[in-house]
Image: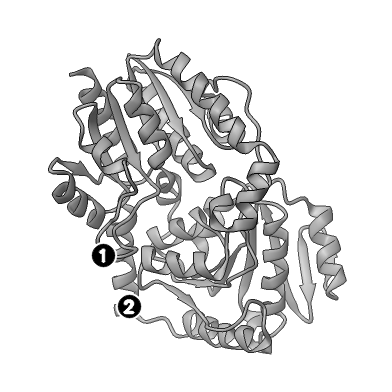
Amino acid sequence: MRLLLVSNGHGEDLSGALLAQALQQQGAEVAALPLVGDGTPYLTARIPVLGSTRSYSTGGLGYTSAAGRWAEILQGQVFYLLKRSLRLWQEAQRADGLVVVGDVIPVLLCWLLAKPVATYLVAYSSHYEGRLRLPWPCGACLASKRFKAVFSRDELTAIDLSQQLGRSVQFLGNPFMEKVLANANASNNKQQLALLPGSRLPEALNNLELMLKLLELLPSRAGNWCFQAALVAELDATAVAQLAKGRGWSCNGKVLQWQGLALELCWGKFNQVLAECSVALSMAGTATEQAVGLGKPVLQLAGHGPQFTAGFAEAQRRLLGPAVFCAPGGVGASHTLEQSLDLLLDLIEKPNAAQQGIWREEGKKRLGSAGGTASMAAAILRALGE
């Protein structure tokens, strides 16, 4: 069976690449057509990417602000989307079925192609408002006979959409959880803080600076803690060192030091850092979800964006539930950082066994268990093969 996988975002590309690998392992021939971004996760997973791709400064998040929308227009992203849509129409003629990982745009495009479709709605959740309000005409497309299978990103959404659409919507897990669940270390006894500044540049570097400001407020007893920052390859050591030195930190190889506090810089060790931490300090999207899926408490620091703004952080708390904490106040303000410090001290120094049990259970309901990707791939092949 020849399948064409269509996604429209960086997080969607990551999940799409993992799902594509599972489909390949079960005998399908898979090619990818990302509508946003350069498709790096597919290339890393050795999934063929069709057509020429490129990325934009908004990182696919232009819809979050008027400035972002204008930036996408000026950079030509609207015309790029039209070009990619034409390529989708051409490639779909040779495919036996389509697999959508995304939201309304690829759902609508694939419905118009009149091919059998399976979709994983990674971008939508009923946790945001209690009842999911699908944008028009997404609901009608998903309820049509052209869509052979629909998968949600959490349990509540599966129940909600099954009622709304009058069809079975399944929750089998989230592909981006597989590797972190496989590396999970349930017997962690360290007081270890993981810094997750995100993956988009230059935002990730700005986020890291805000995190350093918070660490500078830590009391002397924090010398007993372990600190690790999980950094993407694009955030190079030179830029990090320059940032840290500008704030009075010293840099010794992959370790930043400030008044007895040592922060280890970790590239290519994300799963290990997340598995070993007891608390995550996060300004990220998918990485925060992965931490919650492991039952880890997360302290947010809202930033200036374009992704991790105060609005994004608030929506993320609704999505992910009781394990995510954030202090009120203006971005980067001294009183906001001081209240964030109080929250951090409570989370890392006063663990509560009952609360930790709730976090683990909620993480499973909202992100799923290991093995879900293989189950989803098998269900897609059954549905599209009928």
Residue 270 location (% of width, % of height): 57, 52
In this view, the residue farthest toward the top is 94
Question: Type of residue at label 2?
Answer: Gln
- Of the 4 image quadrants, the one containing the C terminus is top left
Residue 159 location (% of width, % of height): 18, 53
Question: Type of residue at label 1?
Answer: Gly
Which residue is the site of mark 2? 355
Per the rendering, the mark at residue 335 is none
**On screen, 222 above or below 94?**
below
Considering only order in the chain, which callout, 1 or 2, is on the residue closer to the N terminus? 1
Which residue is the site of mark 1? 130
Residue 373 location (% of width, % of height): 34, 38
Q: How crowded is mark 1: few (under 14 residues within 10 Å), some or many (20 or more)?
A: few
Q: Which of 61 and 171 is in front in this view?
A: 61
Residue shown at 57% from the left, 84% from the top: 329
Q: Are marks 2 and 1 in contact (CB under 8 Å)?
A: no
**On screen, 73 above or below 227?**
above
